[in-house]
Amino acid sequence: MRPLVPPYVETLKPYVPGKPIEETEREYGLQGVIKLASNENPLGPSPRAVEAMRAASQAVHLYPDATSFHLVRQLAAHVGVKPEEVVLGCGSNELIELLLRTFTTPEDEVLLCQCSFPAYRISAQAHGRPFVEVPMRAGYSYDLEAMARAITPRTRMVFLANPDNPTGTAFGRKALEDFLAAVPPEVLVIHDEAYAEFVDWPDYVSAVELFPRHRNLVALRTFSKIYGLAGVRLGFGVMDAGLATYVQRTRMPFNLTVVAQAGGIAALGDTEHVRRTRENNLAGLRYFEQELPPLGITLTRSHANFVFADFHRPALELYEWLLRRGVIVRPMAGNGFPTCLRISVGTPAENERCVKALRESLS
């Protein structure tokens, strides 16, 4: 009898999202639970975006603009590219799917960094694309030299998360440019910059700056993090106009809602909200860097809106302890880091509550 699904779907392990607040409160009989698990914006969305989305909701009986005309042009002006070099997606995750669908076949290979963002591996397997994973180097960072050596004639696409999720580490301009110089032009390099707006490091470079000189380079960004629009699902890619034309062919029409388009336009214009989010994040990172190491916890240097904390012991028990005290963080055993937790930066009060609970659990 023919199986219902192909083997690569039968063996696929789905992505496990952060535990919701409502589920935690219901399961543990708690109130006032805080969530520091999914790298969301603790300040919420821009008030201007909320108002724009509220107004747009009056038109949800109509299909949205399939080309997202106004949002595309505002985004292009915002990052300094041409409108035809921008492709919008229902979150950057849809763009990962579109790129795999558009540019790879089952005969191609996808190159990944082991233990990096699991969506790359899940999407590749879901499409029946074989993939090769290169281990991280010491310090939980990408080993770009080893990844360049791992490219073969079958390699068609490489995914790089910079800054990385879940480790928060990043690589700089020279490392990326050296890697691009070693990659054949027919191999697409997908530079996922979901946390780029949080980076405070002069060595960092966005693929938006480099792609005009590297036709095989694609930048991915999202409105889920610094703009606080994770719930409306909005992301975008910047790439060579020729590549964008092909992705537009495989993109389903009306993939962005009326509400998402309106919220994105308004969020881009609220530079004050972005500034306050950056300031809150930087202060939160410094707070965790000050408070956690004295507890015996090792942190990476995070360039994102979370810290990657190594407790040097199985961390699942600590995760459960925090849940019972109304603090949701993300266990990393499923990513290959059984002694680690990922803790998103919250408000100052949320950060203090998390540290207090950790101090109690480790005492």
Image (tube, rainbow, N blue to C red):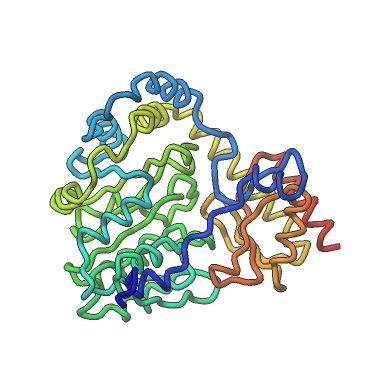
Q: Residue at x 77, y 58 (%)?
A: 321
Question: Considering only vertical position in the picture, is 344 above or below 166?
Answer: above
- Decide if residue 312 is on the left or right side of residue 57: right
Out of 254 and 117, give the one closest to the viewer.
254
Can you say which quadrant of the picture contains the N terminus? Answer: bottom left
Q: Is residue 32 above or below residue 219?
A: above
- The percent position of residue 63, horizontal first and vertical second, equals 27, 29
Q: Is residue 240 above or below residue 224?
A: below
Q: Quadrant of residue 336?
A: bottom right
Judge from the rendering whether residue 191 lies leftward or rightward of residue 297; answer left or right: left
Q: Position of residue 272 (x, y in %)?
A: 49, 28
For the residue pair 221 and 88, the one nearer the viewer reads as 88
- Residue 363 falls left or right of residue 8: right
Which residue corresponds to the image point at 56% horizontal and 68% vertical from the top-left? 334
Q: Would residue 116 appear left or right of 298 to someone viewing this image?
A: left
Residue 189: quarter of image:
bottom left
Q: Residue at x 53, y 68 (%)?
A: 335
Residue 19 locus on image (x, y percent):
61, 52
| Residue most extreme to the right | 363
Camera-side residue: 309 or 323? 323
Image coordinates for residue 24, horizontal then vertical, percent: 68, 48
Q: What residue occupies the far front of the structure in this picture? A: 1
Q: Quadrant of the C terminus?
A: bottom right
Front-lying residue, 86 or 338: 338
When the figure is inspected, residue 289 is found, relative to residue 13, above or below; the finding is above
Tell me which residue sits at (40%, 45%) in the image: 222
Count up the numbered dots: 0
